[in-house]
Image (tube, rainbow, N blue to C red):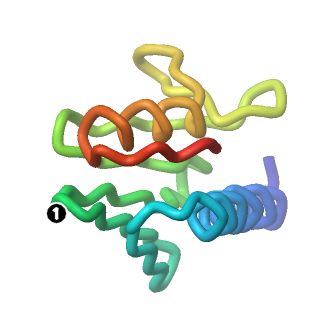
Amino acid sequence: MKDSEFHALADAIYRHIEECIDQSGEDIECETVGGVMTLTFENGVKFVINRQEPLHQIWLATRENGHHFAYRDGQWIDNRQGHELLGWVSLQARRQGGAELAL
């Protein structure tokens, strides 16, 4: 994958997450600075999503664990457990953040 393709894919997934948060009606603060997206839930739980440019990965840090997602077959897939990024963020938002976030 070329760097330009990685940036386009990462930008798209960040925009998608932000749009879904805006439409959710949930009290989730979303801030993106320098390729790092921080989601802060009403209960104080934070998720950090950031780009690992040299590896062409997106990393997700939650209270439970860190996950490294690589783009494969049209989806961002966790290298260790095989979770898909959007589904995993939705599940953890419910479990850890107490928020229903359909991504």
Residue 80 position, x and y percent, is: 41, 18
Q: Which residue appears at 77% of the width and 56% of the height?
A: 9
Rendering quarter of residue 38: bottom left
Q: Which residue appears at 74% of the width and 62% of the height?
A: 3
Residue 26 position, x and y percent, is: 45, 61
Q: In this view, does 40 lie to the left or right of 74?
A: left
- Please state which of residues 88 and 61 is positioned toward the viewer in this rendering: 88
Q: In this view, does 55 lie to the left or right of 59?
A: right
- Please state which of residues 28 and 58 is positioned toward the viewer in this rendering: 28
Residue 94 position, x and y percent, is: 36, 37
Report the amino acid beneath label 1: Gly
Q: Is residue 17 left or right of residue 38?
A: right
Residue 58 position, x and y percent, is: 52, 49
Residue 32 sits above or below residue 44 on the image: below
- Please state which of residues 16 and 10 is positioned toward the viewer in this rendering: 16
Residue that lies at the very extreme toward the front in this rendered image = 25
The residue that mark 1 highlights is 44
Residue that lies at the very extreme toward the bottom in this rendered image = 33
Question: If the image is split into quadrants, where does the C terminus sit?
Answer: top right
Residue 47 sits above or below residue 36 on the image: above
